[in-house]
Image (tube, grey):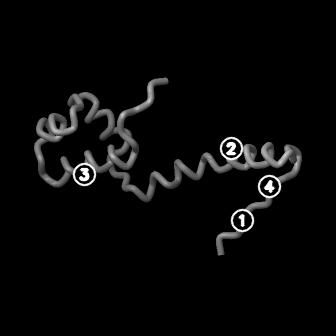
Amino acid sequence: MKRSRFTEEQIIGILKEQEAGHPTADVCRWHGIGQPTFYKWNAKYGGLDEGVTLLSKSCRLPQLAVTIRTALNRPDEPVEPLNAG
């Protein structure tokens, strides 16, 4: 799959520029994207903020745990969950 030129945080920032009152055509031109791309992003990321993207990053934690266990040569050892409080 092709990697995006923009991170999720950047995409959300672009969407917020349009929400702040700038015309969609101008925002697309400033960032070098097409209007169909803008509207696809709006459908996917509209209503999100930067804090929500942290949730998508936390989904990678189990994979990170496997990588660490493998690096320590302990692939069968269970990972203890961290307490939030």
Task: Check the image and report above or below for 26 versus 83.
Answer: above
Q: How far apart are marks 4 and 1 (CA)?
A: 9 Å
Residue at image position (33%, 46%) is 10
In the picture, the disc for residue 79 is: 4
Pointer 3 local density, CA inside 10 Å: few below 14, some 14–19, many at least 20: some
* SS at badge 3: helix
Task: Check the image and report above or below for 37 versus 45.
Answer: above
Q: Distance between the residues labelled 3 and 4?
A: 39 Å
What residue type is disc 3 on?
Lys
| Mark whose residue sits in front, 3 or 4 | 4
Q: In this view, does 84 lie to the left or right of 12?
A: right
* SS at badge 2: helix
**Residue carrying label 1:** 82
Pointer 4 local density, CA inside 10 Å: few below 14, some 14–19, many at least 20: few
What residue type is disc 4 on?
Val
Task: Check the image and report above or below for 58 versus 24.
Answer: below
- Residue 79 in the image: state x and y as whole percent: 80, 55
Q: Which of marks 3 and 4 is nearer the N terminus?
A: 3
Q: Do the residues labelled 2 and 4 touch (CB within 8 Å)?
A: no
Q: Which of marks 2 and 4 is nearer the N terminus?
A: 2
Q: Distance between the residues labelled 3 and 2?
A: 32 Å
Pointer 2 local density, CA inside 10 Å: few below 14, some 14–19, many at least 20: few
* SS at badge 1: loop
Residue at image position (36%, 34%) is 5
What residue type is disc 2 on?
Gln
**Residue carrying label 2:** 63
**Residue carrying label 3:** 16
Q: Quadrant of the C terminus?
A: bottom right
Q: Which of marks 2 and 1 is nearer the N terminus?
A: 2
